[in-house]
Image: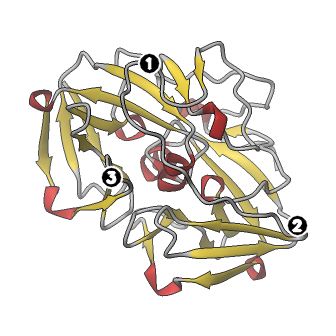
Amino acid sequence: MIEGRCLCGALRYEADPPFQFMVNCHCSMCRKHHGAAFATFVAVRPQSFRWVSGEANVGIYASSENAERAFCRVCGSVAPHLLAAIGQVIIPAGNLEGDLGARPQLHMFTGSRAPWYEITDDLPRSEAYPPGFDLPSVPRPQVTPRPGVVEGSCLCGDVAFEVRGEARLMMNCHCSRCRRGRGAAHASNILYPLDALRWTRGETQVVDFALPEARRFGTAFCRRCGGGLPRVSAGFGVVVPAGTLDVDPGIRPSAHIYTAFKAAWFEITGDVPQYAELPPA
């Protein structure tokens, strides 16, 4: 039995291995929902999944005619959901505890990969759905870049924002809070000065969640779709989940941090420096 939970702990659930599949998805919808470079999902048959607590706190957003997205209404963490089209419960791997006894089998929708994320492992790649997924691709709106402006939005499009000026840094964080908050292998966050952020629509739709036991950590998300959004932190500035961006921010991750706490199922490859916790000041 594998246990899972959201960031705030309102949602708790169990799943019985073996998993039907485990994939990394790079589509823009997954990136926006998670606010991450990519989503990693495992799938089980419905009879192998159980809610332990908090099911009433699950928000559902119909992202297409064939699929829904689920999230915690309290903290915004991506939640498990039944994908009826294939008869499987899809679970975000970043919210599961311990070694899953499985590893990702492939990258899919690499044709939609974020421009700031480089795939450096040897897993098979599929430009869209791999064979066996009899689902149609969903066209997504494209944003024309503007000089000096980095635009982003949530999954449903109710909330949009822009950041201006030079980013301070970008890092991939593997701590358990970031993994739960994003429901992904790691968070990819870009830090901007406090005055860089401007909401262009939907600011009243933004939910800000501050993790009670943390001094600075929290998440922001759209109350309709659960999509990740920037959050203002007095200690860091504006923290932008890079997966929410509609254009290339022109910066790349400079480090993997808190790798001592990384997911057991995720292998870090490539030449970006790694630090067990934080890099030297």
Res 237 seen here:
yes
Image quadrant of residue 85?
top left
Structural distance between the alpha carbons of marks 2 and 3 = 39 Å
Quarter of the picture holding the N terminus: top left
Q: What percent of the width, then of the height, locates residue 157?
A: 52, 70
Do the residues bearing badges 1 and 3 touch, measured as CB atoms within 8 Å? no
Q: Earlier in the sequence, mark 1 or mark 2?
A: 1
Q: Is residue 245 above or below residue 43?
A: below
Q: Is residue 222 left or right of residue 201?
A: left
Amino acid type, mark 1: Pro
Q: What percent of the width, then of the height, locates residue 37?
A: 61, 43
Amino acid type, mark 2: Glu
Q: Earlier in the sequence, mark 2 or mark 3?
A: 3
Q: Residue at x 13, y 27 (%)?
A: 48
Depth order, front residue of 75/226: 226
Q: Residue at x 64, y 40 (%)?
A: 112
Structural distance between the alpha carbons of marks 1 and 3 = 20 Å
Q: Which residue is mark 2?
A: 166
